[in-house]
Amino acid sequence: MKVRAIKTRIFKEGESLEDFISKYVPRLKEGSILVITSKIVALSEKRTAVRGDARAKEKLIRAESEWVRPTKYVWLTLKDGMMMPNAGIDESNGNGKIILLPRDSFKAAEKVRTALKKRLKLKRLGVIITDSRTLPLRAGVVGIAVGYAGIKGVRDYRGKPDIFGRKLVMTRTDVADALASAAVVEMGEGKEQQPLCVIENAPVEFREKILRSELRIALNDDMYRPLFKNV
């Protein structure tokens, strides 16, 4: 698998995402996956807010969340079926503004994919929109797919035998988030200015229709449920 980040100029709020991608990704190989940071998707949608005081930030976080709880450092929130700090809003690389998550990252990914398939005459193409997340009891952040199109997001091993013939009961591979994390390692988190990444030869299943809920787990079925008694 080959993962290659693409250096670009600074993306401007309100500009065309498709035109920006066309400039920096003039061609793609059949079977490629284009990875896009959620920041430039949100900027293209003008999903920003003026930075205010702590009270204004709290109000914004609450408005963007389905559930909120204060912690030592951040507001722990539930949004779009995912647990995340501060409803995904971010002040880094915002040039004085707060950047929210895109309105609908799955829809945005499909829109980009449709345009690229038409322009580049491709049949097999994936698009992933990424954000960064922390993991419990682990330092640092990893990439996560907040939306994707054109690929199956999970590989299911349940009911299949392991190398010794034991039937697997729980095992599934989170393909979408694994690819997002690989891309984010290359794209960086600071001033690298690499909001796009191309992945080639990834072991994925391409498909026209994806199931948005395939990576979601109901709260009552989640192994971490005891940590969220008040959700």
Image (tube, grey):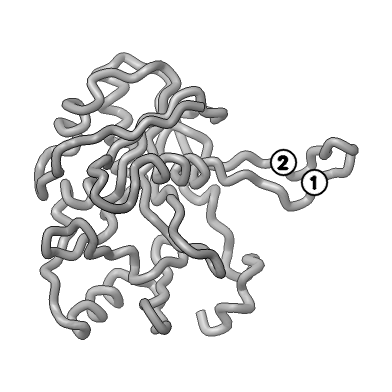
Residue occupying image coordinates x 50% and y 23%: 201
Calculate the distance from the C-alpha at mark 1 to the C-alpha at mark 2: 6 Å
Which residue is found at the position 63% from the left and 78% from the top?
226
In terms of depth relative to the viewer, which is nearer, 183 or 102?
A: 183
210 left or right, relative to 103: right
Dividing the picture into quadrants, the one containing residue 97 is bottom left
- Secondary structure beneath dot 1 equals loop
Q: Which residue is mark 2?
A: 157
Q: Which residue is situated farthest in the top direction here?
A: 121
Which residue is found at the position 41% from the left and 16% from the top? 30
Left or right side of 219 for 162: right
Number of callouts: 2
Say whether marks 1 and 2 touch (CB < 8 Å). Answer: yes
* Circle 2 residues within 10 Å: few <14, some 14–19, many ≥20: some
Quick one: SS at disc 2? loop
Image side of residue 115 versus residue 2, left or right: left
Question: Vertically, is 207 above or below 97?
Answer: above
- Give coordinates of residue 156: x percent, y percent: 66, 41
Residue type at mark 1 is Leu
Q: Position of residue 3 (x, y in %)?
A: 43, 31
Residue 134 sits above or below residue 105 on the image = below
- State the residue at coordinates (16%, 33%): 20
Q: What numbered label is drawn on residue 168?
A: 1
